[in-house]
Amino acid sequence: MSDYASDTLNDLTPEPTGARRVVVLISGNGSNLQALIDEQTHDRLGGEIVAVISNVADAYGLQRARDAGIDAVVLPHGEYDSREAYDGALIKVIERHEPDLVVLAGFMRILSSRFVQRFHGRMLNIHPSLLPAYRGLNTHAKALADGVAEHGCSVHFVTEELDGGPVAIQAVVNVSGDETETSLKEKVHTREHLIYPIAVKWFLEGRLRLVGETAVLDGTPLPPHGLRLSHADAAEELDEDHDDA
Ligand code: GRF
């Protein structure tokens, strides 16, 4: 042992850094969770999903987690008297898993401000619209009713404003003349599965950060709509037919 070795110096030796840890919250099908699991399986996520937590006991996403050998936890909201009590319990379960990032993937709950603040700057959500358009529910029906030419999805940091946090990335779909809610939802889903793993990887690699009220990628502040993938760009990534209106 060197003469200079001391407990103080040893304390400064950095711990070996393990894989960045991700906790995913779901309420249902979990197709976005699956997209993340698939990236992880191919070692492309930049970290490890260490737990999936659902507020709904029979959410199919729990099965997806178990099939992938990921800890699947049910925390039913019905067993708590208030939002605050539930969110307090949820914070405890999440923190037990020591995540670097919390990913909301179809977690159908309004979050208390205590919860949002606890994971400020390290919680992402995916929303099925080109934010700031169509916050809240029924986004596809609203877009169709408005006759928009473009719709899509956005990954954003979670802040106290519902679906209002800074956007990291969004992907556009062209809305065709014969579009139905079902076909539009399907199109948007393919893009969700493309962009969510990208944003999660950026974050886990330290490339994406929330600085004040702005999403920053590789040190450059992103515009309010984040990095935007056009319909054609996404179609190419997804190997889709390009003649899609
Ligand atoms: C997605 O449309 C997502 O944008 C929204 O909830 C839905 C979840 O779908 N937040 P899934 O459970 O990932 O299939």
Image (cartoon, helix red, strand yellow):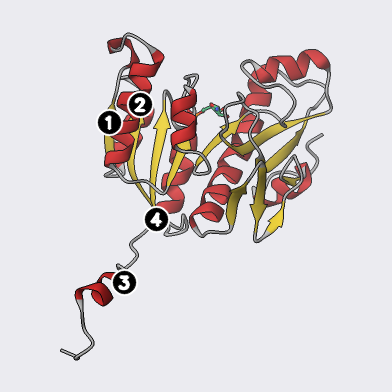
Q: Callout 4: 10 Å neighbours few (<14), some, many (20+)?
A: some
- Identity of the amino acid at label 1? Val
Residue 162 occupies quadrant:
top right
- Residue that badge 1 annotates: 73
Of tags 3 and 4, which is closer to the observer?
3
Counting residues from the start of the chain, the first of labels 2 and 3 encountered is 3
- Residue that badge 4 annotates: 20
Left or right: residue 213 versus residue 43 is: right
- For the question of whether residue 91 can be seen, the reply is yes
Q: Callout 1: 10 Å neighbours few (<14), some, many (20+)?
A: some
- Identity of the amino acid at label 4? Arg
Left or right: residue 66 versus residue 21 is: left
Which residue is depicted at the point 33% across and 17% down? Answer: 85
How far, Cα to Cα, is label 1 from label 4?
20 Å
Of tags 2 and 3, which is closer to the observer?
3
Q: Element at badge 2?
A: strand
Up-down relation of residue 229 to residue 20 (above or below): above
Of tags 2 and 4, which is closer to the observer?
4
Quadrant the C terminus occupies:
top right
Counting residues from the start of the chain, the first of labels 3 and 4 encountered is 3
Q: Callout 3: 10 Å neighbours few (<14), some, many (20+)?
A: few
- Identity of the amino acid at label 2? Ser
Q: Element at badge 4?
A: loop
- Residue that badge 2 annotates: 54
Q: Element at badge 3?
A: helix
How far, Cα to Cα, is label 2 from label 4?
21 Å
Q: Position of residue 207 (x, y in %)?
A: 58, 59
- Residue that badge 3 annotates: 12
Q: Are marks 1 and 2 in contact (CB under 8 Å)?
A: yes
